Image: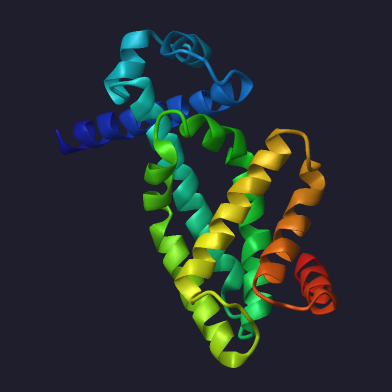
Amino acid sequence: MAGMTTGNTSRADANRRHLIDVAHAELLRDPDASMDQIARAAGVVRRTVYGHFPSREALIGTLVDEAVRTLSAAHAAGRAGVADPAEALARSVLAIWPIADRYRLLVALAQRTVTMTGIRERLAPVRDDCAELIERGLAAGAFSSALPAPALAHVHEQMLFALMEAVNDGLLPAHEAGRSAALTVLAASGVPAARAETLVARASA
């Protein structure tokens, strides 16, 4: 009986994973994709989709939660073991940008349903980690800002959202956006341009 339960759970988890992957692809292709469209693309009936996600908004919320978890892991990995706060900041931005780029259209879509307040709440742990890093950098003289660390972390977050929108609107080439994001965040932290270029080049290599 226990084995049967485990098997059913595994299948349910696999079905949910499949629906999440298909929904992400469909919503990137068509931001107005309905639950019916997602069900057809997944090869299931609509009732199956609703069995996992009670509404389209809940499905989008799940996708946003997954994006935030992936971004948090990348942020931590990017700065791990790097003592210099400025280099850690550059590496963390470069690490999270591919995740942000993958989900940037989804974030624009989520703003219609999850709202920016909901997205900011989900990002609070990442923002707190950034504030800690900025605090350390300010104390060490690696950063210079008229803003306290928590406010500067908030500014960084909003700048990254703005850059995602710039890519969505065709104002910034996607292949240049990661480097641009890192340089922009370092500049906002008071890192001199020449040093910022060196840090980003090193981190990119």
Q: Could you tell me which quadrant the N terminus lies in? A: top left
Identity of the residue drawn at 58% across and 61% down: 156
Could you tell whether 192 is left or right of 59 in the image?
Answer: right
Furthest residue in direction bottom, as rendered:
140
Q: Nearer the viewer, residue 143 or 176?
A: 143
Q: Position of residue 175 (x, y in %)?
A: 80, 46
In this view, 128 is above or below 168: below
Identity of the residue drawn at 48% across and 15% down: 38
Q: Position of residue 164 (x, y in %)?
A: 65, 44
Q: Quadrant of residue 86?
A: bottom right
Q: Position of residue 205 (x, y in %)?
A: 81, 67
In this view, 136 is above or below 160: below
Q: Nearer the viewer, residue 69 or 198?
A: 198
In this view, 197 is above or below 2: below
Q: Nearer the viewer, residue 204 or 154?
A: 154
Could you tell whether 44 is left or right of 162 in the image?
Answer: left
Colouring convention used in this rendered image of the protein:
rainbow
Could you tell whether 81 is left or right of 12 in the image?
Answer: right
Identity of the residue drawn at 65% across and 40% down: 165
Q: Position of residue 166 (x, y in %)?
A: 71, 41
Identity of the residue drawn at 35% across and 33% down: 13
